[in-house]
Amino acid sequence: MESIELRGCSLDELIEICQEMGLKRFRAIQLFQWVQQKAVRSWDEMRNIGEVDRQTLSSHLHFHPLERVREQRSKDGTRKYLFRLHDGETIECVLMDYARTMTRDRHTICLSTQVGCAVGCAFCATGLEGFRRNLSTGEIVGQVLDITHYVRQEDPDFQVTNIVFMGMGEPLLNYEQVLKAIQLLNHEQGQTIGMRRMTISTCGVVPKIIQLAKDNPQVGLAISLHAAQDNARNQLVPMNRRYPLASLMEACEEYTQITHRRVTFEVALTSENARQEEAEALVRLLKGQLGHVNLIPVNPVVGTGMERPTSEQIKRFAQVLEDAGMAVSSREERGTDIDAACGQLRRQWEGE
Ligand code: SF4
């Protein structure tokens, strides 16, 4: 039997593996709960599984928790993690809303889905590095499990409530692994994170948007739009050359028809594009869409040449959209004192 990644296994797969090894079904359930619910990081912590069975299982299942290379804590409660994978590659993920919210009702993790990214958006530190590889299901889920493990050392009741697939990589270019990770994170014997509390953010991989609507109509969709006209978007988001705005808007309409869910359109604002004409073009483009616009003032990233707009520019831009009856929010700045924009911590660490 070939060695299989433990954290990427569904409960059904573990039941089958246990049966092949002559172990009872309840062992698979115990194993699944230790890994997916209690977020343990070693075989030794699985106290109700006897040593002989642990040894049998570990000879067929490999268990590679992520190695925490660095953790940064922002004054606003954001925590950013740099994790090393078993092959030495590194990824980032961010825990938002912690510490700040004493109500403890919402803890969001921004997950990575690839090492590097092939899309190469102009404003993105991850894109500057190019694509290295896809993350496995276990590595995607592992980010939630390991952050949960570390935070529970200080706060035993800690529970992640929301997930955004918005970290390093384009999630829809690692579709199968991301979908399986969503099933695992949602599982009633795992982290039980509601499907509707998970959002996939994509730069616009049109065929996969439609497939997602059909495969999992519960999961939220966010589009990294950033520009309302093809010539500008081609420069910012190279995926637009393959799937221009007309096809992207059609896919979003189909998504809302199937799922009845509204799409979030993310717009990174720089000092360059936060202009009246750009806002008006956005109003024209999104007319008729069941959506909501989220404005994101860019964090300054060395190497991208982008500058942050002034608060006055942001306000004026939002006003144009609101005057046209659109739902608009402006993403709060989080963790600017700790390089929280995707890819920045990894670049800084690799450069040392
Ligand atoms: S913004 Fe997302 S899709 Fe674009 S380069 Fe960065 S990680 Fe890739």
Image: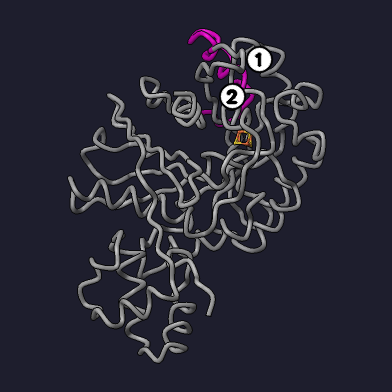
Measuring from the top left, give residue 90's x and y in whole percent. 48, 41
The label shown at residue 305 is none
Q: Is-magenta flag for residue 227?
A: no
Measuring from the top left, give residue 21's x and y in whole percent. 42, 87
Q: Does the residue labelled 2 lie within 8 Å of ligand 1?
A: no
Residue in the picture at 41% in, 49% down: 143
Instruction: Report which quarter residue 189 is drawn in.
Output: bottom left
For the magenta stretch, what is the residue range? 308-329
Residue in the picture at 50% in, 32% down: 342
The label shown at residue 273 is 1
Tell me which image quadrant ligand 1 sits in.
Answer: top right
Q: Determine whether label 1 and label 2 are within 8 Å by CB.
A: yes
Q: Quadrant of the C terminus?
A: top left
Q: Which amino acid, by three-letter code, is at mark 2?
A: Ala
Q: Which of 203 and 7 is in front in this view?
A: 7
Measuring from the top left, give residue 54's x and y in whole percent. 31, 77
Q: Is mark 2 on a helix, strand or loop?
A: strand
- In the image, taking residue 214 as reference, residue 308 lies left or right, namely left
In space, the residues marked 1 and 2 are separated at their CA atoms by 9 Å
- In the image, taking residue 6 as reference, residue 166 lies left or right, namely right
Residue in the picture at 73% in, 26% down: 228
Measuring from the top left, give residue 85's x and y in whole percent. 46, 48
User: Does 224 appear above or below 13?
Assistant: above
Q: Nearer the viewer, residue 255 or 208?
A: 208
Q: Disc 1 or 2, which lies upstream in sequence?
A: 2
- In the image, taking residue 82 as reference, residue 128 lies left or right, namely right
Q: What element carries label 1?
A: loop
Q: Which amino acid, by three-letter code, is at mark 1?
A: Asn
Q: Which of 67 and 192 is in front in this view?
A: 67
Residue annotated with mark 2: 268
